[in-house]
Image (cartoon, rainbow, N blue to C red):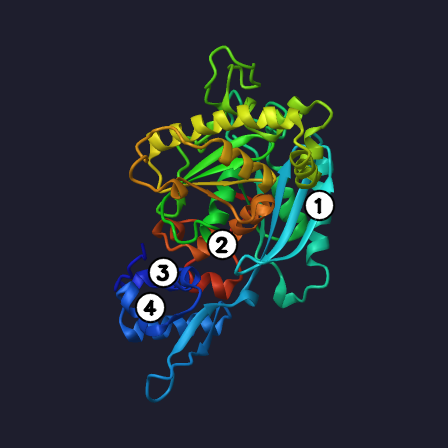
């Protein structure tokens, strides 16, 4: 669904966001098509596209149309060089980072092993990653900010920052304020599942969807419900920790204090435990090659884990569909795509739910096309998501980038790291 513009003068930033979002979603669109889609006057759309082009967010080109007389129509596209952002994904045992452009292309990528329990070492590693990614860039290519994705839940609860699938012991996130001060860049952070969901909404398979559920399969298992292109946060910002829903009566003890939780059967940590000879960091660093070789060799330990994990995936899909009725479920995260494909195949047929008979089988689950990079991409969209998403509530928040850009889009400055 395309958002509609409004004629109120005070809503000019909102109208600009609507047009910018429409250009992003369509890839290439003419001014007339924009007018038809957003219900704004031709002059208003002309003014907006001129403003967006003048600061480099969009580019225009003449369409080749042999059927029309006179000047061919102009089409607008996002300018890949219109902005850059850095994403850092923190997981137990390591950090990965990437520099992306305004259309989600990965320009540079870096990875480093680090003991996630030692915050000072993590801070030093994040600074090195940022410096390595911006080296060689001109002042005009300075990133708008740094986005950081962390395993949740983040808001203090009995199960926050506890266990091997989290950043164990990280009860204080002021270290992210230090990263902002030392790097000189704006910092946004979020639960990795929310970051991944927003990344898919902007640049992934959910680009054309307003409502979907994102299942984040990495060291642990998380999720996020996206409603009207905004992630549902819950009462305290901890929705939706699906990994800690008990599904196996008297099952494996979970670090949250319960037994039989989904994450104990459906996660890379669960796989590492089952294999025994592999540590979770091995799967995070070299998972694609390792798992592909084991699947090709029909490794019975891996196949046995896949069979039981697929049953838990069937449970998860049924729970999500019956409780939330999403348009589709997108699966992403740092788990190797070859592994996720095998789990989805083994999970067929899916259990009956409110989606059964309404959605086609291929619509109930979609796989991220950026599987191993979805965590980094999700982190990188955090500093730019509000700018590219036409939602009234973002105009009331403190946001940043460059002052001219911020003023045009109704954004304000911020003095600390912010959770999105």
Q: Tell whether label 4 touches label 1 (CB within 8 Å).
A: no
* Residue 165 in the image, given as x and y percentages of width and height: 61, 28
Which tag, 1 or 4, sits closer to the chain's start? 4
Q: Is residue 365 above or below residue 249?
A: below
Q: Is residue 6 above or below residue 161?
A: below
Give the spatial CA distance, label 4 vs label 3: 10 Å
Which tag, 2 or 4, sits closer to the chain's start? 4
Name the quadrant containing residue 275. top right
Q: Is residue 419 above or below residue 281?
A: below
**Residue labelled with disc 4:** 34
Name the residue located 61 percent from the left edge and 32 percent from the top edge: 219
**Residue labelled with disc 3:** 18
Local packing at callout 2 (Cα closer than 10 Å; few below 14, some 14-19, many 20+) is many
Name the residue located 47 percent from the left edge and 47 percent from the top edge: 198
Q: Which residue is more in the foreground, 124 or 377?
A: 377
Local packing at callout 4 (Cα closer than 10 Å; few below 14, some 14-19, many 20+) is many
Which tag, 1 or 3, sits closer to the chain's start? 3
**Residue labelled with disc 1:** 111
Q: Which residue is more in the foreground, 70 or 151?
A: 70
Label 3: element kind: helix
Give the spatial CA distance, label 2 vs label 4: 20 Å
| Left or right: 280 in relation to 250 | right
Give the spatial CA distance, label 2 vs label 3: 16 Å
Name the quadrant containing residue 9. bottom left
Name the quadrant containing residue 122. top right
**Residue labelled with disc 2:** 203
């Amino acid at each position: 669904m395309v958002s509609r513009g409004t004629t109120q003068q005070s809503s000019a930033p909102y109208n600009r966001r609507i047009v910018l979002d429409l250009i992003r979603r369509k890839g290439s669109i003419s001014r007339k098509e924009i007018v038809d889609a957003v219900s704004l006057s031709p002059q208003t759309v002309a003014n907006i596209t001129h403003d967006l082009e003048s600061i480099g967010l969009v580019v225009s080109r003449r369409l080749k149309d042999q059927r029309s007389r006179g000047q061919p129509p102009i089409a607008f596209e996002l300018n890949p060089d219109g902005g850059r952002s850095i994403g850092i994904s923190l997981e137990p045992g390591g950090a990965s980072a990437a520099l992306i452009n305004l259309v989600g292309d990965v320009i540079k990528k870096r990875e480093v092993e680090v003991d996630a329990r030692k915050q000072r070492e993590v801070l030093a590693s994040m600074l090195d990653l940022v410096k390595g990614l911006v080296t060689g860039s001109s002042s005009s290519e300075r990133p708008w900010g740094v986005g950081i994705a962390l395993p949740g839940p983040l808001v203090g609860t009995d199960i926050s920052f506890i266990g091997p699938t989290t950043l164990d012991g990280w009860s204080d996130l002021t270290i992210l304020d230090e990263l902002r001060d030392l790097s000189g860049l704006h910092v946004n952070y979020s639960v990795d599942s929310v970051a991944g969901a927003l990344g898919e909404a902007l640049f992934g398979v959910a680009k054309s969807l307003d409502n979907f559920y994102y299942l984040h399969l990495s060291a642990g298992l998380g999720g996020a419900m996206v409603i009207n292109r905004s992630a549902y946060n819950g009462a305290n910002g901890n929705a939706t920790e699906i990994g800690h829903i008990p599904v196996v009566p008297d099952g494996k003890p979970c670090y949250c204090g319960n037994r039989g939780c989904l994450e104990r059967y459906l996660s890379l940590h669960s796989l590492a435990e089952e294999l025994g000879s592999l540590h979770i960091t091995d799967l995070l660093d070299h998972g694609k090659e390792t798992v592909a070789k084991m699947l090709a060799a029909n490794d019975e330990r891996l196949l046995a884990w896949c069979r039981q994990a697929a049953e838990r995936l069937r449970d998860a899909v049924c729970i999500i569909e019956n409780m939330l009725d999403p348009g589709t479920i997108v699966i992403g995260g740092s788990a190797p795509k070859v592994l996720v494909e095998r789990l989805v195949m083994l999970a067929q047929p899916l259990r009956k739910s409110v989606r059964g008979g309404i959605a086609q089988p291929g619509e109930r689950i979609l796989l991220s096309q950026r599987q191993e990079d979805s965590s980094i991409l999700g982190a990188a969209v955090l500093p730019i998501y509000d700018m590219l998403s036409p939602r009234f509530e973002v105009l009331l928040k403190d946001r940043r980038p460059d002052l001219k850009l911020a003023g045009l889009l109704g954004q304000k400055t911020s003095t600390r790291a912010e959770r999105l």
